[in-house]
Image (cartoon, rainbow, N blue to C red):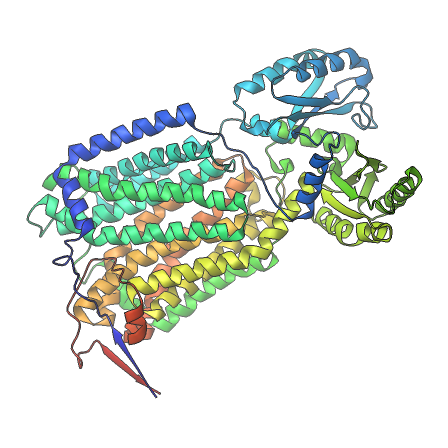
Amino acid sequence: MQLTGQTGTARPPADGPPGRGLLYGVGHACARRPWRVIVVWLLVLLAAVAADRAWGGAYGDDFDLSGTPSQTGADLLNAHGARGSRGVAAQIVVRSREGSLASHREALTAAQGRLEELPRVVSVVGPPGAPGAVAEDGRTGSYTVRFEETPAKFDKAYLDRVDDAVHGLRADDVTVEYGGPLGQLARPASADRASEVIGIGTAVLVLLLGFGSVAAAGFPLLTAIVGLLAGLSALGLLAAQFSFAAVSPTLATMMGLGVGLDYSLFLVTRHRKLLHTAATPAEAAARTVATSGRAVLVAALTVTAALGGLFASRVGFIGMLGLAAGTAVLVGALAALTLTPALLGLAGRRIDRWHVRPPVDEPDDQGDIWYRWAAAVRRRPWTFLVLGLLILGTLAVPAASLRLGHIDAGASPTSSTERRAYDLTADGFGPGANGPLTVVVTLDKDRATTTEQRTTLAEGLHDALVSTPGVASATMPGPTPDGALLVSTVTPDTGPQDRETADLVHRLQDEVLPRALSPQGATGYLTGGTAGQLDFRDVLADRLPHVVGIVVAAAFVLLLAVFRSPLVALKAAVLNLLSIGAAFGVVVAVFQWGWGASLLGIEETVPVESYVPTMMFAIVFGLSMDYEIFLLSRVRETWLQTHDNHRSVASGLAGTARVITCAALIMTSVFLAFLLSSSVVVKMLALGLGISVVLDATVVRLLLVPAAMYLLGRANWWIPRWLDRLLPRLDPEGAHPTPPAENAPGRVRETR
């Protein structure tokens, strides 16, 4: 049987000469009328920022896990009017500095009354007199304040009113700290601004040293900042209609600033190269957008598609994080494709007038360092391939011990009120008091109709709960006002993020409750914050393979349509998965094993936050495809002109190595700058993303990709004829050469 394929074929476009399509027109128009474009962007930016300030929404974590035991239990409590089920609970922890809280009874009662008078407060339960609200030592107590909605979304000014309500306690020598969502509201101002300044400052340094030209450094920075501000404003307006996680603006900032710099830098570098031969600067800008602009567009769509794959988790919290990051990416790409050519047209041929060193662009000289590197890889492709795989494999080893969980307030800085509230609660009530579990029991109307039957059921359940290993205490199950449910509070021996607490939740849900309740025809559910977080973890772990499959499949099809090569698309997907595994390994080693964690300001080992692997996979896979597309688009461009695989790989590597290296340094600095954040989850994402970019720009792009392409030879560009006809045409570089003749070197025929 014969299998016939072809390599590098492309059809002439139907809309005119090569490169004279829509993107060419956009680039030419923006460069010809730069001031119009700049003014439009300025007006759009001012309008977006003003609209965000006037109508923008707030951010807060909101989990909806329909069908899980924790969500079912919470819905039952709300439906049957259980006491304390309405609204969102937050804790105010109090501790007497001297003596017991009983000596401060008057101040405690007055504070409770003032808290109840605050707007949006549903109820306040706590000392004095509330059962379980005072610890055995008599010095530590806790108010449970329920709000109409999560106070984490309130304006910071609301915290001043809470401070006023408890001022009398502090004046009476009582320590007061805020926990839960109220503690989140009290978090100090984010270090995001400092992180942004560090990222931008590093970008200036890298661009000036890498390219010499002040304009080459300034234009990408200006474009990225404009795109970032517009993207964050758009996200704020979306937050008024949809629920976005608290980490969303930070994630959008990381992504928007990073890709905005990358995309604009890629265009500026190509423009300065084309400026040598173009008739006018506007023509050079137009050709830049028509060629490299296509790569930017495909790269942005690839990143967005990868982020959109997060909706495959069927968890709104995760999908909306992808939407937040994707919004920043798309706005950043739009700014790069319009504002950058406008700035280039405005600069004209004087773009390198101001420089700090002799300006450089893409190399032509075969003696350039990157051509020499490509030649070294070509001489020993197996050596470099094995070396790269060993590096990634070694770094990925810790990922085998990945443990997902929820990072609670115990990992926050000791300077934060939520951490102090957490420690006071653990000291006074035990570590499990920071993550109590609520048991909700639905009764069989036929078997639990009398008070005696319900009492017997409640006593049997209580005995089963308190005798379970890992349970510190459990309240006697009591009925809801309508008598349809029994409710009990279980306090674990261990803290919310400990492995033993997760084991206890599964033991109670899978063994203890069915064994105690099934004979009576009753059903039990575990709910509460800790149970919900563990259900969230389990749901994401189960659905992560779906996300991975959809994202990889979508990226594979997109690369296949762009580069017309099954092997190139498959190689890109496999290498990206390897680099992601290595990034996961580094995150596990630092946060879960504690290697170097103290350098990041983390005082104890923590599990990997349950949604971090899913987010990291989508983001890293998309960003890796960015560099893959930038590199392969130049390799394919040379291949279509020469049909010489070795020359194409060397030319593509040399032509993009400088810009990819500088872009990677900038994006890494942007990500790692967010290690200054007080949030452990943000630190986790920052380190994982930063390491992944470094690995992708060095090990993958400089070792594995060229080595693999040298070894595969002309098979890189083989594609079956039937598949070539089936796929849509998505040419990232706008090149449309004449197809090779039947016996030309570009033909490949395989016989079986």
Please state if 310 lies on the left or on the right of 19 as rendered.
Answer: right
Vertical placement of residue 666 versus 111, above or below: below
Residue 602 in sight here: yes
At x 31%, y 48%, the residue is 662
Vertical placement of residue 698 versus 70, above or below: below
Please state if 658 lies on the left or on the right of 470 as rendered.
Answer: left
At x 38%, y 73%, the residue is 382
At x 53%, y 22%, the residue is 156
Q: Answer with the quarter of the image where residue 650 lies.
A: bottom left
Quarter of the image containing the N terminus? Answer: bottom left
Residue at the limit of the structure toward the left, as seen here: 279
Q: Position of residue 636 (x, y in %)?
A: 24, 64
Residue at the limit of the structure toward the front, as seen here: 446
Q: Which of these two is toward me, 34 or 223?
A: 34
Q: Answer with the quarter of the image where residue 742 lies.
A: bottom left
Residue 194 in sight here: no
Quarter of the image containing the C terminus? Answer: bottom left
Q: Position of residue 285 (x, y in %)?
A: 16, 46
Instruction: Tally the numbered discs.
Output: 0
Please state if 568 lies on the left or on the right of 602 as rendered.
Answer: left
Please state if 349 lies on the left or on the right of 474 as rendered.
Answer: left
Q: Position of residue 393 (x, y in %)?
A: 49, 63
Q: Position of residue 198 (x, y in %)?
A: 38, 35
